[in-house]
Amino acid sequence: MPRSILVVEDDSETREYFAEVLSGDVGRDGELADETERAGAVEVADEAETIGDPEAADLTSYVVSTAATLREGLESLHRSQPDALLVDLGLPDGNGLDLIREARALSKDILILVITVFGDESSVVSAIEAGAQGYLLKAEAPADLRESVRQILCGGAPISPGIASHLLRRFQETNHSESKSKLRFTRRELDVLGLMVKGLPYGEAAKVLGVTRNTVAGYVKSIYSKLQVNSRGEAVYEALSQGIVDFDPQI
């Protein structure tokens, strides 16, 4: 079943481009997708559904709606309750953070990806604390935006390298020894948490660790409980801010 995505972006050209990329009208090279690409996308989705792999199907099955303002975004959010929300923070009639908070209050299941020009510490931390699972700078956004959306739908946490490095530097300036001593994780939980910080979806983390996806989900549930969080973005933020795991942006 196609996943629904709401794109909230005030710049009309950027908004239309995001919608075209996510709906499959634009190929990975930024040009209009030809019939072969579109047919291949449908074929992949059909095959994924046949073998029972909804994560793969999600890669090519998006229904996209758009909004240009905070007000329009709020109306669309309540009307459609999308599976995923792509939002810019700088909107003409307000802050995208308000939309993130409203989406999170509406449902814990809505996955939220910020795509913005704002890379300052305050914006990043505020978005994560509000409930965003991913944060991409427009200048560093990957060519394949669909892949970033697939990651977030599959449990990943796409973060621009500049943002990750920025957060890491900030957290390294703080002494985390006291925070570490208050929480005790098993070796396997730390392995899973480290892979979460690197942005791996649960399925890929399971392959790396040689366990099932359900086993990884069990570890994640335990991690959420210990960190007292409700989303992957919050878990990654706490893991870095408390110095529980290290992050190497080169990996």
Image (tube, rainbow, N blue to C red):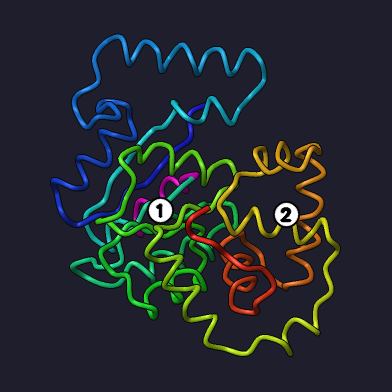
* Secondary element at tag 1: helix
Q: Earlier in the sequence, mark 1 or mark 2?
A: 1
* Secondary element at tag 2: helix
Question: How many marks are shown on the rendered structure?
Answer: 2
- Quadrant location of residue 166? bottom left
At horizontal 63% and vertical 90% (from top left) the residue drawn is: 175
At horizontal 59% and vertical 52% (from top left) the residue drawn is: 109
Check disc 1 and give the amino acid type: Leu
Disc number lying in front (1 or 2): 2
Check disc 2 and give the amino acid type: Val
Q: Residue 7 placed where, x, y %? A: 32, 48
Q: Main secondary structure of the magenta part?
A: helix
Q: Residue 26 placed where, x, y %? A: 25, 28
Q: CA distance from mark 1 to mark 2?
A: 32 Å
Cβ atoms at labels 1 and 2 below 8 Å apart: no
Q: Is residue 150 magenta?
A: no
Residue, disc 1: 77
Q: Residue 110 placed where, x, y %? A: 53, 52
At horizontal 80% and vertical 84% (from top left) the residue drawn is: 181
Q: Is residue 156 above or below residue 167?
A: above
**Front residue of 228 and 164:** 164
- Quadrant location of residue 136? bottom left
**Front residue of 151 and 206:** 206
- Quadrant location of residue 198? bottom right
The magenta segment: 74-83
**Circle number at residue 192:** 2
Bin the neighbour count of mark 1 within 10 Å (Cα to Cα): few under 14, some 14-19, many 20 and up: many
Bin the neighbour count of mark 2 within 10 Å (Cα to Cα): few under 14, some 14-19, many 20 and up: many
